[in-house]
Amino acid sequence: MDDCLFCKIVRGELPSKKAYEDDDVLVFHDIHPIAPVHLLLIPKLHVESLASCDAKHQAILGKLMLLAPRLALEQGLDQGFRTMINTGHGGGQEVFHLHLHVFGGGEHIPKI
Ligand code: 5GP
Ligand code: ZN
């Protein structure tokens, strides 16, 4: 996806503060954090949203989920963290490249 913001980050055309990378996943710090630690976990391959996923995305979805607690701990979130996936305009999604938010730390985390 030529004009996708997160694909540009994957390709290194836009800078990011990376926290983790392997062959199929990139993790970087959100540019506008809503908590002391706020990571975005993304598949390197472009997928628009959770609603665009099907059975062939099962492995990458599982991988993102299992990375979340590991990276949260690495970032010092030993008291826990929150995960969030916004899907579609109705779900508040602004960047249409699937991403898992992982955030926490500090005194208070807003209650949903
Ligand atoms: P969404 O609302 O789509 O779930 O979340 C998109 C997130 O991407 C937002 O939290 C926003 O702050 C973050 N974001 C948008 N543009 C950039 C960018 O260029 N770099 C980084 N690191 N984060 C971004
Ligand atoms: Zn993309």
Image (cartoon, rainbow, N blue to C red):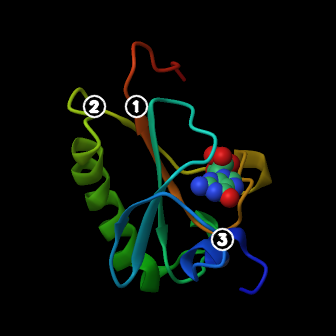
Could you say whether the residue bearing mark 2 is in a helix, strand or loop?
loop
| Badge 2 or badge 3: first in the primary sequence | 3
**Looking at the image, can residue 87 be seen?**
no
Residue type marked 1: Gly
Q: Residue at x 60, y 81 (%)?
A: 46
Could you say whether the residue bearing mark 3 is in a helix, strand or loop?
loop
Q: Are marks 3 and 1 in contact (CB under 8 Å)?
A: no
Q: Residue at x 39, y 13 (%)?
A: 107
- Work out whether residue 69 or residue 30 is closer to the camera in this orientation and state it: 30
In the displayed structure image, the side of residue 64 where residue 87 appears, left or right? right
Vertical arrangement, residue 33 with respect to residue 109, above or below = below
| Badge 3 or badge 1: first in the primary sequence | 3
Q: Please, which residue is most extreme toward the top here?
A: 107
Residue 87 in picture, x, y percent from top left: 65, 55
Badge 1: few (under 14), some or many (20 or more) residues near its Cα, within 10 Å? many
In the displayed structure image, the side of residue 64 where residue 8 appears, left or right? right
Q: Could you tell me which quadrant the C terminus lies in?
A: top right
- Work out whether residue 100 or residue 7 is closer to the camera in this orientation and state it: 7
Quadrant for residue 57, please give it: bottom left
**Alpha carbon distance from label 2 to label 3:** 30 Å
Q: Which callout, 2 or 3, points to the residue nearer the camera?
A: 3
Q: Which residue is labeled 2 in the image?
A: 80
Residue type marked 3: Leu
Q: Which residue is labeled 1 in the image?
A: 104
- Work out whether residue 16 or residue 110 is closer to the camera in this orientation and state it: 16
Q: Residue at x 57, y 32 (%)?
A: 34
Q: Which residue is labeled 3 in the image?
A: 14
Vertical arrangement, residue 106 with respect to residue 77, above or below = above
Residue 53 in picture, x, y percent from top left: 55, 75
Q: Which callout, 3 or 1, points to the residue nearer the camera?
A: 3
